Every structure is written in structure tokens, then in C-alpha cells.
């Protein structure tokens, strides 16, 4: 029955050109395809998908089969595995890499605790394939993938004894080994840049994402690992992982001595320190020191002239605050002088010309958040969203809100502030556009992306029938007040920039033929200051970057709309 339905919808859709498929087409294709796979008809599904007549259908709708396909592959049923692997390979080749990326990362995020290791190792190669298809525009996507993967891997229990590391029951060792293979082509790309140019820019986007990956790996899981020396465990995957992380750091142009010195904060000139997280977290640098001077990891690439005593002396002021986490009460926020401290930190983070002070300000800002108790965090977040007026700061706050919601949804962590009736007023502050559809999406990118990621997470994590956060009760307001205006603004912005890009390319083409003797220029204004005029090539590059940014926003927004539509459609059918 399901196979007949799949054949019918595919045959009907063959007559539809381009991407003119209706929501009903998507729904029927997904439902019939999933049922066929679950019933063991993977060979027939493969035959349909690889048919050249169905290429356009697969390109537009095929990625929706990732969910059921991954679940079947995880079951490892012998008779279905070859065909299912072939289906996955075909989807990776034909479907849009942006949609594939969102779909694959969603499967990683949704993995149950007991299947994290299997899911991660299964999807690493497909993810790598998709990211490589993005070409030179893959840096931010690589960063998003690495962050999602490490967040899941960090949930795995860390082996304590030699026997536990050898048995690797929970799969942490296997995941760490697989992650090294996953990042290898991206590391090689950065290394090639170093080889060709004898140097690489510190703000190279792919290099920055790999740096974040290394720093996060040093924080988790390596900070919690007690490495075994070779005499105790000859072959140690965790020791190999630690070694490779330090080698990667060196390969992408990071000086290990500088990382262990406060000079790293004075000397680096990396813009966008509010993008995602502090790039040089203290706990990561502490782990780096331990690996080098206690475990003697990668010590051969560290200058012997810099002794551990020198490094310790140079970092003597970098010890963490002694105040216990979650201990400061909400009453402190009522003190005007106390609440003014984070507000002044925001000024330092966003306005101070000194990079060292900006970075330290962000670290102290996060530390202060960690020290508040739950109610204080809630009221602090509300206050900052109302007063910061800076998209980067607001995005940082929203990311912290997501972390608190995630913590509250876990067993035994429920509270009155980040679930239910108290959470909804906070979400209304998060899920809004400052100027409606006319909001500058590029200027507010950090806030918008974090807001969409939060909403997508809640719709996936908090099931409709549980509704612990109250998100499903509030959903119709969110659609009217946030999602629809955002869709309108996104369509207008994308159309405008695409038109500008087309015009810029045409002007460049005419100029190259000699019809225009004076070079075209484009003026860009940032914070009321005009930047130097851009060449036509630079102008095209900026416009292409903007269009790609809109595509990223649209990918997440479309996924949210699909989740909502999927939840609402069965109810509409019953009511009809």
C-alpha cells in the first residue's frame, strides 16, 4: 500500500517543474517513503530515487527521508543495510547541501543518550561530504557542525580506569577518533593556505572554527580525562586525541607558548569576539598546560626554553573566581550598583578599543551569569534583553537562555523560571524583531540566529503533549508576531541583495569589456563611519556573503515552519 502511494506521488510530481511542489506533495512523499523504509522495502525505494526522471523530486524532497533512514541504519538490520546506505549516498549527492546539513545535525541533536556514539559515528562521514560540497562558503557551517557534534559527545561518560578506556562501552573513545578523521580535510585546507602564503590571516573563518573546536575539545572531554601513560596503556585513543588537538592548534597557526601566556589576549586581533563564545577559555588553556607539562603531550613541538615555572609565573593572575556557581540570590539585582556592573561590562565588550579588555570583559560577564541562582539568572536575562541594544550581546544572552531551558528539561532539574508561565514573558522578549519586517537582518544576525535555534530546539525537545515550556500554547502568537514578519523581511532583503548582486555582476562584465573606463565603487557605512570604497570584486563578494547569510537564516526558518506544519496538519484533518 505504502509503496503504491510512493509510486503514485512520484509519478504525479514528475510533471511538476522546478520546485513547484505543494505541502501535500512533501507530506505524502515523506509519509509513504518512511513507511516503505520501515516495512523493509528499501530496495524498491532506492530504485525509485535513482531513476533519472525523479532527480528533481529527490533534489527537493529527498532530504526529508534522512530521519527514518538514519533510524533504520542504527538498527543494523542486515537485509536492509546495503540498500539504505545506497539511498543515503544518493541523497548526499543530489539534495541541497544546506538542507542536508540541517537534517543531519537534527538527527545528531535528537539522539537518545544510549545512541549518541552510534549516531555520531554513523553521520560523521555524511556530514563531511555535505560540508565539502559547500566549497569556499563552508566555514560557518563547519563551525555549526563541530559545535553540535562536540555538545553531544560531551554527554558521554568519560572512562576512568584503563579497562574502561579499552572496553569503551559508551563510545567516547571511538567518537574522539572519528572526529579527528572528520576535521582532517578542513585542517589540511588551512595548512595549504599557510604553505601557499607562508602565513594565514588570524581572522580566516575556517581557521577560527577549527580553533573553537580545539578549545572546546580541551574543555570537554579532555579537561575531565585522566590520561594513562604509555607504560600503563600502550594504545590510548584519548591520549591520541589530546595529541592531535595540540598538533592541530600548531598546524593552524596557533603558537603554544603564546596560548599559555597572557600575551595571547594582547597580541591577537580577531574581530567578532561575541560571535559564539570566548575563543580562548581559561579552562581550555588550563587543560592545555596540564597536557603539556604533566602528561607531556606534544611536548616535542613546544620550545624547551620556556619552562613550566616561567609559564606558571606568567599566568599567576588567571585563577578562576572562588564564588560558588548558582549561589548569588536575586536580591542582589535590586542593588543599583550591583546591576550596573554587567551593564558596564557590556560597554567594555562592545565599545572598548582595547581587544584585551573586551575579551576579559566577556569572560567576567559569563562568570557573573554562572554565579547567579535560577531566579536571578531569569531576571538578569530579562533586564539585559531590554537594555543592551546590541545584537551580539542579545544573541549571547539568548544562548544562555537556551542552556538554562535545556538544563531545566532534564530529569530532576525542573524549576518555575525556565519552564511554564514564567518562561513565556521571557520568550516574548527573545522572539521579536526590533522593527518588524523592516528590521536590518544582517545587523541583527547574531540575535536572529540564536532566537531561531532556540525556537527550533524547543519545538523538537519539548513534545507537544508534554508542553513543559508552554511553547505550544504560545505558538500561534509566535507565528503572527515573529515568524511571519521575519519571513516577510527575509524575502524583501534577499530579493534586494540578489538584485544588487546581479547588477554588480553585469556592471563588472561591462567594465571588463572596456565600455566603462572608470572603476565602479561601493561605499559601506559601519557605525556611522564610512569605510574605504570597495572594488567591484569586493562589492560582489560582500553581496554574495549577504545572500548566503540570508540562505542560512532561511534554512533554519523553513525547518521551523515544517515542524509547525507537521504538528498542525493532523489536527486539521481531524477537525475537517
Image (cartoon, helix red, strand yellow):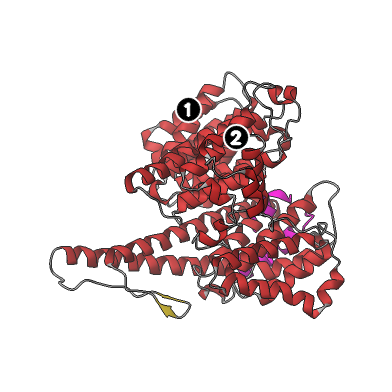
The crowding category of the residue bearing disc 1, from other C-alpha atoms within 10 Å (few below 14, some 14 to 19, many at least 20), is some
Q: Position of residue 515 (x, y in %)?
A: 13, 69
Find residue 204 and name its label: none
Give left or right: position of 375 versus 46: right
Question: Can you say whether 238 is above or below 449 in the image?
Answer: above
Q: Earlier in the sequence, mark 1 or mark 2?
A: 1
Q: Mark 2: which secondary structure?
A: loop
User: Which residue was labeled with disc 1?
Assistant: 86
Where residue 69 appears, x then y in whole percent?
Answer: 57, 33
Q: Quadrant of the C terminus?
A: bottom right
Choose top left, top right, bottom left or bottom right for residue 56: top left
Q: Is residue 459 magenta?
A: yes
C-alpha distance separating marks 1 and 2: 41 Å
Q: Nearer the viewer, residue 436 or 335?
A: 335
- Location of residue 287 by image quarter: top right
Our reading of the magenta stretch's main secondary structure is helix
Residue numbers of the magenta segment: 455-483
Q: Is residue 260 magenta?
A: no
The residue at the point 78 percent across, 66 percent down is 378
Residue to which mark 2 is pinned: 297
Label 2 crowd (10 A; few <14 / some 14-19 / many >=20): many
Amino acid at each position: 500500500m505504502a509503496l503504491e502511494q510512493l509510486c503514485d506521488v512520484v509519478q504525479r510530481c514528475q510533471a511538476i517543474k522546478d520546485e513547484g511542489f505543494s505541502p501535500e506533495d512533501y507530506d505524502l512523499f515523506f509519509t509513504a517513503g518512511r513507511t516503505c523504509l520501515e516495512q523493509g522495502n528499501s530496495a524498491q525505494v532506492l530504485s525509485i530515487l535513482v531513476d533519472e526522471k525523479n532527480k528533481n523530486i529527490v533534489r527537493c524532497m529527498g532530504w526529508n527521508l534522512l530521519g527514518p533512514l538514519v533510524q533504520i541504519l542504527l538498527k543494523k538490520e542486515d537485509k536492509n543495510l546495503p540498500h539504505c546506505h545506497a539511498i543515503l549516498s544518493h541523497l548526499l549527492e543530489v539534495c541541497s547541501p544546506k538542507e542536508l546539513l540541517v537534517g543531519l545535525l537534527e538527527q545528531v541533536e535528537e539522539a537518545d543518550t544510549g545512541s549518541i556514539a552510534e549516531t555520531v559515528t554513523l553521520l560523521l562521514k555524511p556530514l563531511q561530504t555535505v560540508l565539502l560540497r559547500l566549497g569556499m562558503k563552508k566555514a560557518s557551517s563547519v563551525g555549526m557542525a563541530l559545535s553540535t557534534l562536540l555538545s553531544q559527545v560531551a554527554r558521554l561518560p568519560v572512562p576512568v580506569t584503563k579497562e574502561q578506556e579499552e572496553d569503551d562501552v559508551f563510545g567516547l573513545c571511538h567518537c574522539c577518533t572519528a572526529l579527528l578523521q572528520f576535521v582532517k580535510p578542513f585542517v589540511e585546507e588551512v595548512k595549504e593556505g599557510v604553505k601557499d602564503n607562508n602565513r594565514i590571516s588570524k581572522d580566516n573563518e575556517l581557521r577560527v572554527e577549527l580553533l573553537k573546536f580545539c578549545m572546546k575539545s580541551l574543555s570537554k572531554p579532555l579537561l575531565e580525562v585522566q590520561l594513562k601513560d604509555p607504560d600503563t596503556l600502550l594504545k590510548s585513543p584519548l591520549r591520541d586525541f589530546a595529541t592531535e588537538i595540540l598538533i592541530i592548534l600548531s598546524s593552524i597557526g596557533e603558537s603554544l607558548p603564546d596560548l599559555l601566556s597572557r600575551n595571547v589576549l594582547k597580541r591577537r586581533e580577531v574581530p567578532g569576539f561575541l560571535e559564539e563564545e570566548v575563543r580562548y577559555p581559561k579552562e581550555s588553556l588550563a587543560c592545555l598546560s596540564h597536557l603539556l607539562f604533566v602528561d607531556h603531550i606534544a611536548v616535542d613541538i613546544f620550545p624547551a626554553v620556556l619552562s613550566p615555572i616561567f609559564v606558571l609565573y606568567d599566568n599567576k593572575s588567571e585563577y578562576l573566581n572562588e564564588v560558588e556557581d548558582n549561589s548569588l540570590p536575586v536580591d542582589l539585582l535590586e542593588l543599583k550598583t550591583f546591576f550596573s556592573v554587567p551593564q558596564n561590562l557590556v560597554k567594555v565588550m562592545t565599545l572598548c578599543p582595547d581587544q584585551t579588555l573586551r575579551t576579559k570583559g566577556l569572560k567576567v560577564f559569563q562568570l557573573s551569569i554562572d554565579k547567579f541562582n535560577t531566579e536571578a539568572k531569569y531576571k538578569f536575562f530579562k533586564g539585559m534583553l531590554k537594555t543592551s541594544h546590541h545584537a551580539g550581546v542579545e544573541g549571547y544572552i539568548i544562548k544562555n537562555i537556551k542552556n538554562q531551558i535545556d538544563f531545566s528539561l532534564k530529569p530532576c532539574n525542573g524549576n518555575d523560571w525556565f519552564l511554564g508561565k514564567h518562561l513565556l514573558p521571557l520568550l516574548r522578549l527573545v522572539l521579536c524583531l526590533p522593527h518588524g519586517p523592516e528590521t536590518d537582518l544582517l545587523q541583527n544576525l547574531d540575535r536572529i540566529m540564536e532566537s531561531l535555534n532556540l525556537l527550533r530546539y524547543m519545538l523538537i525537545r519539548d513534545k507537544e503533549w508534554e508542553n513543559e515550556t508552554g511553547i505550544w500554547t504560545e505558538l500561534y502568537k509566535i507565528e503572527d508576531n515573529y515568524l511571519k514578519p521575519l519571513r516577510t523581511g527575509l524575502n524583501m532583503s534577499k530579493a534586494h541583495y540578489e538584485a544588487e548582486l546581479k547588477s554588480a555582476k553585469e556592471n563588472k562584465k561591462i567594465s571588463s569589456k572596456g565600455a566603462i573606463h572608470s572603476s565602479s565603487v561601493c561605499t559601506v557605512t559601519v557605525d556611522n563611519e564610512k569605510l574605504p570604497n570597495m572594488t567591484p570584486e569586493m562589492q560582489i563578494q560582500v553581496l554574495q556573503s549577504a545572500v548566503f547569510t540570508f540562505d542560512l537564516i532561511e534554512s533554519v526558518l523553513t525547518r521551523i515552519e515544517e515542524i509547525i506544519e507537521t504538528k498542525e496538519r493532523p489536527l486539521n484533518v481531524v477537525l475537517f
